[in-house]
Amino acid sequence: MTTNHFIPHPLLANAHAQTIFAALVSPLVRLKQTQRLWVPLADGDALLLNVESPEVDDPEKPLVLLMHGLGGSGDGSLIVRQSAKLNRLGYTALRFHHRGCGPGSQARARGLYHSGRTGDIAATLSFIAKTWPGRKCLAIGYSLSGNMLLRLLGQQPRANHAHLQKALAVCPPIDLEACSLALSKRHNKPIDQFFSLMLTRQARARELQRPPGDRRKLEFGLSLRQFDEVYTAPVAGFVSRDDYYTQCSSQSVISSITVPTDILVAADDPIIPVDIFRSKGSSSVCVRIESYGGHMGFYSRDHTSYGDRRWLDAFVLDWILKS
């Protein structure tokens, strides 16, 4: 990971400013060649995979799977923006949508996506191997998807996904309990409300697919911990929120990862305590801790070599080009 260390923009020196600015402010980007594919899942559901191909597709270049964070979709500004940049460099980007996320996905998803749905990522990797036989693949998971990707790689042997060349997890909540407690602190209330609002909207839309008598009532205004207790855990089949967090955190399996994997985190991330990354325990995993950046922020003081101040994009592109 050779990208220069991150220096925050002077107007966004605060971790919360970095986090909120990156989430809410992004240029409008239009993709040119979108192909919609549906990945079949073992339980009969399907998830959406958008294929963004460059004008000339080089089969020697690996495909790049981009997986979004909690409450979002593969249509999020970060994923779309990075897909466009990848296309300009001649790479095919695969925009992954968790089940029920993305246009037309609700009708194809009876099951709920959550941090334990690592099988959905495994199914997508298998789908990629069958659709592009012999093609290498890079997988990048942001936030919640980063935790899921790490857990999958720690649980399954490398031979299961032989085409997966490398993996990158950005700001992953590898200890869900610790991250949930951090999110619940008073100074993080705006971020907590943001996640809760997105999840509640998704859940209410999902409930409308159910018969009226079977619908669960969800009020707006819950914290994420409350949402996971009253909705995520019981709907996903866990005994409680604590059971969900324990079973679905990746921290305990990172030491078993054999696929070359990088983790990028910021020491000032307001919702991902940096101490949970101090001991990774695997020679295949490299952790890079930046002093600043917030949660998925990294808006830089200086322009990067790619023409803007999106340091996170530059880091990801550098990582891909050196893979």
Image (cartoon, rainbow, N blue to C red):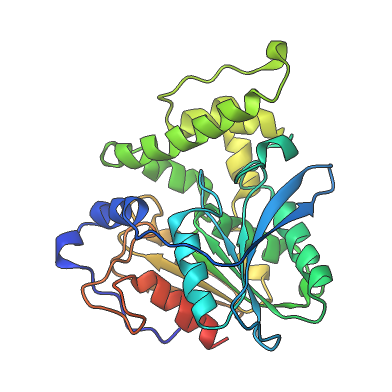
Q: Nearer the viewer, residue 272 or 35?
A: 35
Image spot of residue 274 (x, y percent): 39, 61
Q: Position of residue 226 (x, y in %)?
A: 48, 28
Measuring 74% from the left and 60% from the top, which residue is drawn there?
124
In the rendered view, would you say 244 is above or below 231? below
What residue is shown at x 52% (from left), y 64% (from top)?
A: 31
Q: Can you say whether 251 is above or below 165 in the image?
A: above
Residue 216 horizontal side relative to residue 41, left or right: left
Image quadrant holding the C terminus, namely bottom right
As drawn, 144 above or below 57: above
Asked which quadrant contains residue 33, the reply is bottom right
**View extreme (left): residue:** 10
Q: Identify which residue is drawn at 54% across, 81% down.
A: 320
Nearer to us in this view, 106 or 171: 106
Left or right: residue 288 compared with residue 186: right
Figure quadrant of the N terminus:
bottom left
Q: Nearer the viewer, residue 308 or 295?
A: 308
Q: How far from the left and from the top, in percent, is residue 123? A: 78, 58
Taking the view exactly as shown, the residue that stands out farthest to the top is 213
Q: How many numbered badges does the structure rendering display?
A: 0
Locate residue 138 relative to residue 30 in the image: left or right.
right
Q: Is residue 240 visible?
A: no
Tell me the quarter of the picture where residue 245 sits: top right
Side (left or right) of 295 relative to 83: left
* Towards the viewer: 42 or 34: 34
Asked whether residue 70 appears in the rendered view, the answer is yes
